[in-house]
Amino acid sequence: MRSAAVTITGVRDAVVSVGSPMRNAYVSFSTMTCSVIAVEARRGDRQFFGFGYTSNGRYAQSGLLRDRFIPRLLAADPAALADEAGDNLDPRAMRRIVMADEKPGGHGERSVAVGGLEMAIWDLAAKVAGEPGHVFIARRYGEPAPVDAVNVYAAGGYYQPDAASDQLRHELRRYLDLGYAVVKMKIGGATLAVDLKRIDAAVGEAATTGGSVAVDANGAFDLGTALAYGRALSERPVRWFEEPVDPLDYHGLAEVAAAVTVPLATGENLFSLPDVRNLLRFGGMDPRTAILQMDAVLGYGLAEYRDMIDAGKAFGWSRSQFVPHGGNHLNLAATAAFGLGACEVYPTKFQPFGVVDARTRVDDGRLRLPDIPGLGLERRADLMAAMRGVLD
Ligand code: MG
């Protein structure tokens, strides 16, 4: 007998604070928020909930969700979101449904709202299938059965007010002791001389466990400053130099790429396939060493992200160079499902939205994927508690 179709019966969102006093080179996170989203659905007499949350670094998207994207999803013909068998949803179809009547280009942050909503649909559909998210995603895309652990790196090293001079070293030590092989710190919030002292201390700390340090300028430098940092970093064993110039300054990035040998990384602030194609065409980065950090949840969801991976292939980029930004459960699942290089996580920042927490151990830099149906948010009681507003 054919199983019943899945019908979406409600979508709710709420705003959660992830504020903290820390800074990077460009912004303070003191008023940062994110949207949490719950999609409720029925198949026969069974009820399912899918959960999503918008990725770190952009604010909550309540207006866009409530005024445009949630109403379009609820108004859609259920058949438009059904899979081939008709007994589950195909999350890949959501983008086309909710982006009806949206002009191309000028993406703004609507891509963040759509990405968070699509995340909840993936979580829901994987639960309907009774599969962990990464297994479901791999099957949906015809990929081989995925690995159950992926490389992750610990992002932190923000500028903290009134921090003791050895606070950064202690923070990175903590990540190394948890088993991370790569740790990331912020740069560009101090002078080059001060930052080089911070970087050298961090590199020395990481070397004690055979680990390495990546640095992130968050797009704050003009070309001259980016070149000065890039040349200094090229003399050090730094894993990568992230966002040396404005995320949309492909010409400036190409100038940096031509002048330095430290691997470059960027992409977390490119939210669409056309933007990523421009980066690949004009950014001048070396596909053998550079890292692409697009984030499915900031950029219209996994369907758009998969298109970015395929565009990368056409330009000679292997999947090992894709390392999604954001410390997000959907990005972690995508890393396993598509065989990507690694995924960013936040052991102590943006809690409880960093995928891991300060007690999560990783095995030689590898994190095990949640093994319950869906993306695994339920594995974190504190995360589900923070999402209470969307459940009540
Ligand atoms: Mg970054």
Image: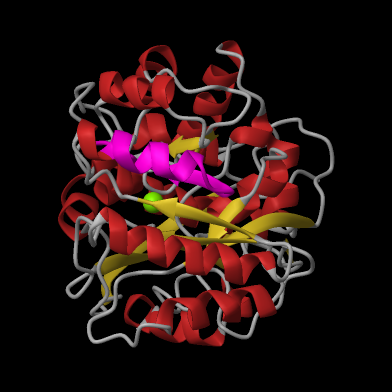
Q: Is residue 231 magenta?
A: yes
At 27% from the left and 43% from the top, the residue drawn is 219
Q: Quadrant of residue 284?
A: top left
* Residue 315 left/right relative to 164: right
User: Relative to 177, is 126 above or below?
Assistant: above
User: Relative to 11, is 208 above or below?
Assistant: below
Viewer-nearest residue: 382 or 124: 382
Q: Can see residue 219?
A: yes
- Residue 170: percent from the left, percent from the top? 51, 83
At 16% from the left and 50% from the top, the residue drawn is 67
State the extent of the magenta-drawn residues as a range.
Answer: 226-246
User: Relative to 172, is 250 above or below?
Assistant: above
User: What color scheme is it?
Assistant: secondary structure
Viewport quadrant of the C terminus: bottom left
At 31% from the left and 33% from the top, the residue drawn is 227
Q: How many labels were placed on the picture?
A: 0
- Residue 305: percent from the left, percent from the top? 50, 34
- Residue 38: percent from the left, percent from the top? 41, 66
Q: Quadrant of residue 168?
A: bottom left
Viewer-nearest residue: 243 or 118: 243
- Residue 83: percent from the left, percent from the top? 62, 36
At 19% from the left and 67% from the top, the residue drawn is 28
* Residue 82 left/right relative to 39: right
User: Relative to 21, is 340 above or below?
Assistant: above
Q: Is residue 147 magenta?
A: no
Q: Can see residue 39?
A: no
